[in-house]
Amino acid sequence: MDDYGLDLEEVARVIDAAEVLVVRFAILDKRLLVDARTSESEGPMVAVVPKANSVEERFKSLKKLRPRLPLPDKIMSFMWPRQMETFRASGLWDKIEGRMVSLGGEQMLEACKSVFDELAQEEKAEVMAAIRGGDTYQSLWERSG
């Protein structure tokens, strides 16, 4: 265990080895999907995807996203307990980016940047909704008269 609340070395090994990886974030409903599977016609994929309600649903959505690839034996997953910037600072994001580029070439850099930015925007919107007391949030204290 370290300052991030999980074993970074173990997570790094999962990032290096997993065919398909889903990263869950503490305050986001969206997920990071990292698919390292490739074929002659398909490169690796990194994307922001909706939360799945079950393992079966995740496999089905993966089949829709990558119909020309066989389903993986398993989908690895971990929960990142902190913010996106902390995810980058931990070195794990660079590890994901590096793996995607090694499998799919330099064009994967832009895809990774776009996905990171999207997750950071989602996080910012979620934090703002919490501060403002959005639909899914309620104030703990309210000023009375």
Image: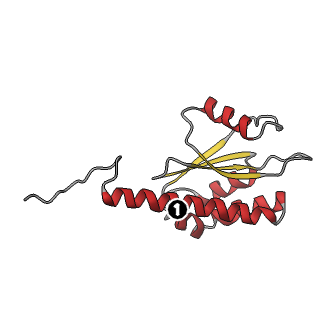
The residue sitting at 54% across, 33% down in the picture is: 53
The foreground one among 126 and 4 is 126
In this view of the protein, which residue sits in the foreground, 124 or 95? 124
Residue 26 image point, x, y percent: 47, 52
Whole-percent x, y for residue 102 in the image: 82, 61
Question: In the displayed structure, does residue 115 sit left or right of residue 72?
Answer: left
Q: How many marks?
A: 1
**Residue toward you, 4 or 145:** 145
**Which residue is drawn at the image coordinates 40% and 60% (left, top)?**
127
Residue 80: image location, x then y, percent: 53, 54
Residue 82 in sight: no
Return the residue found at the far bottom: 89
Residue 52 lies, with reference to residue 17, above or below; the image says above
Residue 42 seen in this snapshot: yes
At mark 1, the secondary structure is helix
User: Which residue of the protein is positioned furthest toward the top in this rendering?
Assistant: 56
Given residues 21 and 112, the one toward you in this image is: 112
Q: Amino acid at mark 1?
A: Gln
Q: Residues within 10 Å of mark 1 (few under 14, many from 20)?
A: few
Residue ID at (70%, 59%):
96
**Residue, far right:** 40
Colour scheme of the rendered structure: secondary structure
| Vertical comparison of 29 with 99: above or below | above
Residue 40, percent across and down?
92, 47
Q: Is residue 23 left or right of residue 42?
A: left
Give the quadrant of the C terminus: bottom left
Give the labeled residue for mark 1: 121
